[in-house]
């Protein structure tokens, strides 16, 4: 066949110029003989150029346009001679030109041989993922809570903060070397060391001042009690971090002194809340190892034309290495895309259905740093053959989804947490001052305490300690809420990228590209990505769950004791500052825990919606198989009167598949996709039943949240009635 021989000539000539895929015994399972595979696919393509008899018999239809090149269909021919011959054979076949809108912009002119050379290079680049040759310690990917290590490091920090302070390193020398202790902040000069030293100093000066020097009892014990509690909780938090650190990291801690960045990467704030692209890439790789996701098979195809900016992100493994990651600029970019897409989608009509090309105008004033916004960005263009056949890296796509969740998730302002911590630190002093001023019989000793240097040293030291440590502890709880919100956001996106009708989506969800839900491998990769979204950053999420569990146990005990006092079950007398501070701390803590419970319940409910979405796709694909002849007929495509967006996507995608590989191949793809969707639906059912989001072993769902809400309302009513007697 002339086309086949021409193609073989092109491919053989290109092998010296195209990037070669290196193979070796040490390159791992991700390396493939990509040239041979593509050559075989191209031969199969040339052998199936003709339509099936059922499609080619429609020879009495109206003629299409002669100039196929202007309609964007020239991509399937290898030469001008082959193009002329093919056009004369199929001149009356309307499937060749009716998918392109009359208003479409002129597309890039590529011959078929140029297209396949381009595809070949893209696939070689895809398979040359650096992850395929990286070597990693497998045990580092599996993180567990080691209870022995937890008690060990809890004892270390309890000894430091409550007893020996900076001299702790002397007592620990028989157990840990100086390098290890320097990395813990027990020895040497570092930010962590200074922070811990001042924490110990302030706490112990205040404690022994209250215990020994306060002969006139002018110092309020509530403040030192608060400081002791927040310090004890900090010991728990640090011990949990070490108990979930990898063995290789613990071993390395004795061998080298970590830099500030290396230490920060282990912290929840810098390492997870403010995670950078390179760090996130490492967490994704560990998740792929844990879930045994094969990198060479973790790929996606799309049914939309990807914007050039994100196409580069989905294909360039060094994109974020070569460009500095700017959080604020990323946020502006996403908002820019969202606004343009919303404006463009408002102009879509029922019959055009996203097949018109809409180009965003450039803003008037943009500085040099934001030069990106001066460029033109096209949206809602009909994807070409190259767009539909393009395969992108699942790892890079997942990374961009997670980075987007970081940008788009709404979080509590740090200023609010700082204000709450400030109130928490000032409240005992303010309450005592008001009690003193409002008292009818002012105690002379209590009044003179405001002139005592001991009182002010005690108050200021505990104010600083309570403010800083309580702020850090609240930040840990807020990071738990942020983690849950990001998971909720990405889980919603998992449903959105399988929704053909983009008008059903919220405006931020429309930005993310529609997956090719006709492609079985894309669907399987979707399931892999869905599992990984809840698993990425496992070492941090385990810590968050443990932090929440510790806080829940400790403050539930405090809350039970407080309620027993409130309802006079226990006969104790507490000072006003202690009562107010107890209520304040309980309310703060239960607010964050409630947010985590509520968001976790929503995540589990999203699984139900995903099952419904998969079920809907199965129904639509079944209808597509049954009514294939009617939906894919040239007459139907010409009329363009279908309402179902899935059927329109099928016309767009399968007309190329039918043209290149035949109707049997189309049916094979659909049947495989149906089987995959059934497997996915079954897996989601099992995930919902056996592996929901849990805290303290409690599966979070609407039933649990309704029970919690009912209990809280009943408790509030009972406490109100206790004080007011309204219901008596």
Image: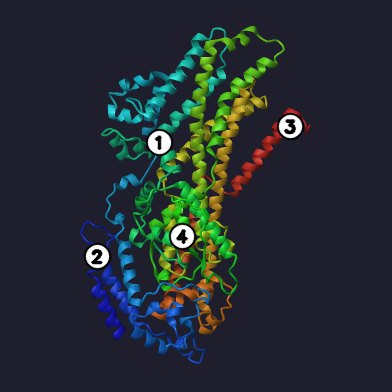
Q: Nearer the viewer, residue 476 or 626?
A: 476
The answer for how far apart the CA atoms under marks 4 and 1 are is: 45 Å
Total marks placed: 4
Q: Which residue position is annotated with label 2?
A: 20
Which is closer to the viewer, label 2 or label 1?
2
Q: Which residue position is annotated with label 1?
A: 241
Helix, strand or loop status at disc 3? helix
Visible residue check, residue 572: no
Q: Are marks 1 and 3 in contact (CB under 8 Å)?
A: no
Q: Which is nearer the N-term, disc 4 or disc 1?
A: 1
Q: Which residue position is annotated with label 3?
A: 721
Instruction: Characterize the local packing of mark 1: few (<14), some (14-19) or many (20 or more) Cα atoms within 10 angstroms.
Output: many
Q: Position of residue 242 (x, y in %)?
A: 38, 35
Q: Are marks 4 and 2 in contact (CB under 8 Å)?
A: no
Q: Which is nearer the N-term, disc 1 or disc 3?
A: 1
Q: Position of residue 722 (x, y in %)?
A: 72, 29
Quarter of the view holding residue 705:
top right
Task: State the mark number for residue 375.
Answer: 4
Q: Residue at x 38, y 19 (%)?
A: 164
The furthest residue to the bottom: 60
Helix, strand or loop status at disc 4? loop
Helix, strand or loop status at disc 2? loop
Instruction: Characterize the local packing of mark 3: few (<14), some (14-19) or many (20 or more) Cα atoms within 10 angstroms.
Output: few
Q: Which is nearer the N-term, disc 2 or disc 1?
A: 2
Decide if residue 356 is on the left or right side of residue 301: right
The answer for how far apart the CA atoms under marks 3 and 2 are is: 79 Å
């Amino acid at each position: 066949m002339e086309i086949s021989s021409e193609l073989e000539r092109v491919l053989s000539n290109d092998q010296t110029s195209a990037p070669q895929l290196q193979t070796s015994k040490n390159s791992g399972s991700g390396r493939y003989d990509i040239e041979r595979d593509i050559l075989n696919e191209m031969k199969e393509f040339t052998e199936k150029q003709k339509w099936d008899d059922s499609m080619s018999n429609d020879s009495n239809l109206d003629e299409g346009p002669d100039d196929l090149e202007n309609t964007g269909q020239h991509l399937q021919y290898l030469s001008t001679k082959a193009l002329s011959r093919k056009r004369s054979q199929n001149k009356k076949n309307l499937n060749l030109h009716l998918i392109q809108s009359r208003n479409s912009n002129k597309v890039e002119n590529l011959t078929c041989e140029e297209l396949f050379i381009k595809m070949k290079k893209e696939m070689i680049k895809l398979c040359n993922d650096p992850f395929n040759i990286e070597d990693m310690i497998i045990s580092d990917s599996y993180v567990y809570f080691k209870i022995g290590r937890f008690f060990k490091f809890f004892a270390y920090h309890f000894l430091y903060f409550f007893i020996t302070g900076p001299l702790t390193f002397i007592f620990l020398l028989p157990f840990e070397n100086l390098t290890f202790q320097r990395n813990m902040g027990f020895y040497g000069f570092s930010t962590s060391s200074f922070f811990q030293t001042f924490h110990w100093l302030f706490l112990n000066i205040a404690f022994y001042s209250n215990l020994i020097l306060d002969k006139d009892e002018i110092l309020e014990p509530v403040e030192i009690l608060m400081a002791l509690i927040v310090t004890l909780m900090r010991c728990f938090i640090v011990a949990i971090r070490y108990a979930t650190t990898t063995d290789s990291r613990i071993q390395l801690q004795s061998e080298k002194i970590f830099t500030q960045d290396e230490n920060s990467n282990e912290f929840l704030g810098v390492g997870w809340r403010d995670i950078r692209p390179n760090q996130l890439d490492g967490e994704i790789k560990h998740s792929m190892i844990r879930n045994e996701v094969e990198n060479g098979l973790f790929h996606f195809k799309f049914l939309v034309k990807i914007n050039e900016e994100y196409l580069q992100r989905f294909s360039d493994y060094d994109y974020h290495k070569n460009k500095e990651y700017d959080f604020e600029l990323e946020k502006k970019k996403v908002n820019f895309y969202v606004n343009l897409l919303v404006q463009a989608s408002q102009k879509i009509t029922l019959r055009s259905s996203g097949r018109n090309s809409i180009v965003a105008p450039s803003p008037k004033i943009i500085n040099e740093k934001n030069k990106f916004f001066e460029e033109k960005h096209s949206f809602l263009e009909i994807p070409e053959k190259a767009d539909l056949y393009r395969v992108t890296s699942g790892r890079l796509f997942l990374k961009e989804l997670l980075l987007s969740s970081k940008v788009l998730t709404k979080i509590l302002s740090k200023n609010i947490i700082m204000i709450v911590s400030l109130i928490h630190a000032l409240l005992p002093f303010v309450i005592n001052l008001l009690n003193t001023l409002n008292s009818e019989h002012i105690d002379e000793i209590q009044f003179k305490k405001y002139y005592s240097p001991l009182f002010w040293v005690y108050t200021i030291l505990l104010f600083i300690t309570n403010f800083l440590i309580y702020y850090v502890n609240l930040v840990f709880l807020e990071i738990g809420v942020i983690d849950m919100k990001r998971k909720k956001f990405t889980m919603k996106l998992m449903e959105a990228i399988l929704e053909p009708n983009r008008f059903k989506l919220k405006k931020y969800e429309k930005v993310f590209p529609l997956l090719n839900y006709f492609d079985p491998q894309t669907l399987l990769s979707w399931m892999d990505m869905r599992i990984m979204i809840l698993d990425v950053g496992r070492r941090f999420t385990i810590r968050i769950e443990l932090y929440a569990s510790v806080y829940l146990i400790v403050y539930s005990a405090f809350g039970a004791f407080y309620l027993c006092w409130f309802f006079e079950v226990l006969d104790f007398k507490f000072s006003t500052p202690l009562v107010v501070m107890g209520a304040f701390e309980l309310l703060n803590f239960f607010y964050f825990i409630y947010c985590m419970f509520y968001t976790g319940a929503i995540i589990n409910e999203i699984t139900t919606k995903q099952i419904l979405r998969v079920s809907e796709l199965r129904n639509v694909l079944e209808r597509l198989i049954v009514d294939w002849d009617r939906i894919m007929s040239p007459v139907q495509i010409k009329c363009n009167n279908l309402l179902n967006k899935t059927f329109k996507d099928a016309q767009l995608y399968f007309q190329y598949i039918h043209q290149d590989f035949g109707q049997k191949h189309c049916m094979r793809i659909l049947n495989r996709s149906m089987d995959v969707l059934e497997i996915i639906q079954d897996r989601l059912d099992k995930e919902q039943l056996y592996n929901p989001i849990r805290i303290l072993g409690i599966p979070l769902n609407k039933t649990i949240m309704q029970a919690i809400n009912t209990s809280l309302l009943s408790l509030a009513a009972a406490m109100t009635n206790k004080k007011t007697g309204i219901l008596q």
